[in-house]
Amino acid sequence: MRKIVLPGDLVSTNPKLAGSGTYIENGRVYSKILGLLDQTETQVRIIPLKGRYIPSVGDTVIGIVREVTANGWIVDIHCPYTAFLPVQEYPNMKPDKKPNEILEIGDAIIAKVLNIDPKMKVTLTMKDKLCRPIRFGRIVAINPARVPRVIGKKGSMIKLLKGELDVQIIVGQNGLIWLNGDRRKITIAEEAIYKIEQEAHTEGLTDRITEFIKRRKENVTKA
Amino acid sequence: MLQKPKLIIDGKRLDGREFDELRPIKIEAGVLKRADGSCYLEMGRNKVVAAVYGPRELHPRHLQDPSKAVIRYRYNMAPFSVEERKRPGPDRRSIEISKVSKEAVEAIVIKELFPRSTIDIFVEVLQADAGSRTACLNAASVALVDAGVPMRGIISSVAVAKVDGVLVLDPIKEEDYYGEADIPFAFLIRNGKIESITLLQMDGRITKEELKEAIKLAKKGAMEIYKLQREAIMKKYEIEKEDIENAQ
Amino acid sequence: MHSDILVDIKKDYVLSKLRDNERIDGRAFDEFRKIEIYPNIIQKAEGSALVKIGDTQVVVGIKMQPGEPFPDTPDKGIIITNAELVPLASPTFEPGPPDENAIELARVVDRGIRHSEAVDLSELCIEEGKKVWILFIDIHALDDDGNLMDASALAAIVALMNTVVPAERFELGNDFKLPIKDIPISVTSLVVEDKFLVDPSRDELSVGDNTITITTDKNDNIVAIQKSGSYLLSEELFEEIVETSIKKAKEIRKLVTS
């Protein structure tokens, strides 16, 4: 079991090993967040247990349109920075169409982070096959720090969910997840995701989730 | 003019404590749903709740700092928290406490990671009994950790008072009111060691030597509080692990 | 002004479940979330209570002090109710003086207590025309997960029920327990299309802040009504809501008296 560390805990005396979640002072490496200590020979890093989503270029995110302007849409991606989707980044945008005819305030979208400028202004794009406006299905929100666990090593956890339940799942790095498929299966997927979120830093999780899904599927077919 | 009562009787304080003894403390992390991080804390008869929101967007724009997060700290007393009902809203004392507390936190949060945003810390005093500002800072520190805010370490805070010529740790209301000096402290604690002072005020009069003694006393108290703050956070996050192990 | 995306994404889900006559947390349409009542948690106050309805949390504290009566009621005490929707309780609350929502909440809670005559104001007279007891009901929100109104009203009456008048502190005789004559209970429902959901959670309120609060006394009289939100309410639906509110208030009153 990985150890939980708090801000200020000393995690290494070798600054060369300092990885994410740490800071260096006077040649010593400290944790800067609440998280799980992950030590290897080449790196000491802290896996965060909590924290707001901070965007990175290339991230898939799910957001809600808050404002429509002449040049595009201002999108809330649940982070300290508002994101902007320029009209040019909407696929197959016809020149005679106005932005508010494509996406309205309140619409949810799956998009990708295209660029982040030094002032932390985030630009989105929807020119990617994963991206789309969300018109059906369900959006579920989890602690963004747990997203890697929901995806799993090399996508193993997500493959498990998709395989066992035959649902579409797109995971936003910002903690929002889109589910689509049969309603009861989506409900099981949602419960499984919350379970993964709760038990993220424990061992044997994949097996427990497989078990959980199998049991819930039985209940559904019995009903 | 009220007769000043004796505060030290037969070498013991009014509530029976030793000079270097803290009041009973209770800390619970993660008590609110809407906040990003939160903490409920009791220190003697002080009952406070702290909530942290952020980093989050800061409006209006002109308040944003292009290079780092802005920290905001609001210390507020509920009207029923003191003997004579307090009018709701900030008064001069609350504003001063909010300022020095904010500055204590600012020195510790790694703000450069979140330019143009704000980290909001709200602390409500539900019941007050001397040292409410120290109780609030302790709660705020736990709430910041619970919110996942990056910091250089943990803040632990406690006051020292001089009563009847004696220095005592963590004064109660009577000691604060009738004492000769009240000195609230807050320290940055890293890896189990006190590194530096992040909040310091004094109300009253003391000698240089007494001040040195007071610092020693405060550090002792702060270390004990730090242990309890750690326990409270571990308790919340370890609990998940335990539940699963028990369920197997 | 911060809006909360976590609430917004629930809107469609709430509506789609409603079409199947279900609520997202599986509750019946007339079911309250779990209610927890903790009386007397602020010992220094004259009376107090913490109430949790689901994840919504409110603390109410009662403070009393002598003061001058109003000129037109020289022999009656005075009740002043105030609500602080402090920013701690929600990402959407801003610091500052009470806004229209806080004021509305305080006034509706106040009307329920006043018109049920839960507190007999003539028992709060100290010296007619000169001195009466002023009773402050201070509502302090801690966590807004929907329906702060009912949590506040419940905390207020429970706080009053454990209030001790601090006569000794002001040298006005012995302390005495504040006599409480009734137990007003408020029931708030969210109105959506032709349906209503009792005790709406914050996620359910994402479909619109259209609510109606009905407060009743122990004899099932109605002592406060507040329609809140810009929507059109049919008479039929309103009558149903009144019936249900009376029924639910009875159940909650039992919780309080046990």
Image: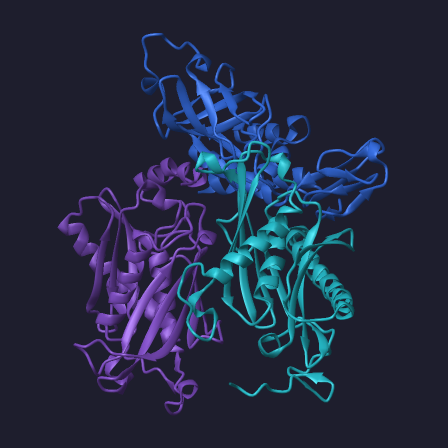
Q: Relative to B211, is C144 above or below?
A: above
Of the pair C181 and B214, the residue shown nearer to us: B214
Q: Where in the figure is residue A160, as x and y percent of width and height?
A: 61, 30
Question: For the view shown, which residue lies furthest in the bottom direction?
Answer: C173
Quarter of the picture containing the C terminus of chain C is bottom left
Q: Where in the figure is residue A69, as x and y percent of width and height?
A: 36, 21
Q: Is residue C213 left or right of residue B68?
A: left
Q: Is residue B148 left or right of residue A220?
A: right
Quarter of the picture containing the N terminus of chain C is top left
Of the pair A220 and A153, the residue shown nearer to us: A153
Of the pair A98 and B44, the residue shown nearer to us: B44
Q: Colour of chain B?
A: cyan
Q: Relative to B194, is A205 above or below?
A: above
Q: Identify the residue shown where x is 46% and y is 74%.
A: C40
Q: How many marks?
A: 0
Question: For the view shown, which residue lies furthest in the left direction?
Answer: C235
Of the pair B31 and B62, the residue shown nearer to us: B62
Q: Colour of chain A?
A: blue
User: Would residue B171 be visible to someone looking at this image?
Assistant: yes
Q: Where in the figure is residue A39, as x and y percent of width and height?
A: 80, 38
User: Would residue A192 be visible to someone looking at this image?
Assistant: no
* Quarter holding residue A203: top right
Q: Where in the figure is residue A205, as x and y percent of width and height?
A: 66, 40
Q: Relative to C223, is C173 above or below?
A: below
Snapshot colouring: by chain
Among the chains, which one is purple? C
Q: Identify the residue shown where x is 59% and y is 55%.
A: B100
Q: Identify the residue shown where x is 56% and y is 28%.
A: A162
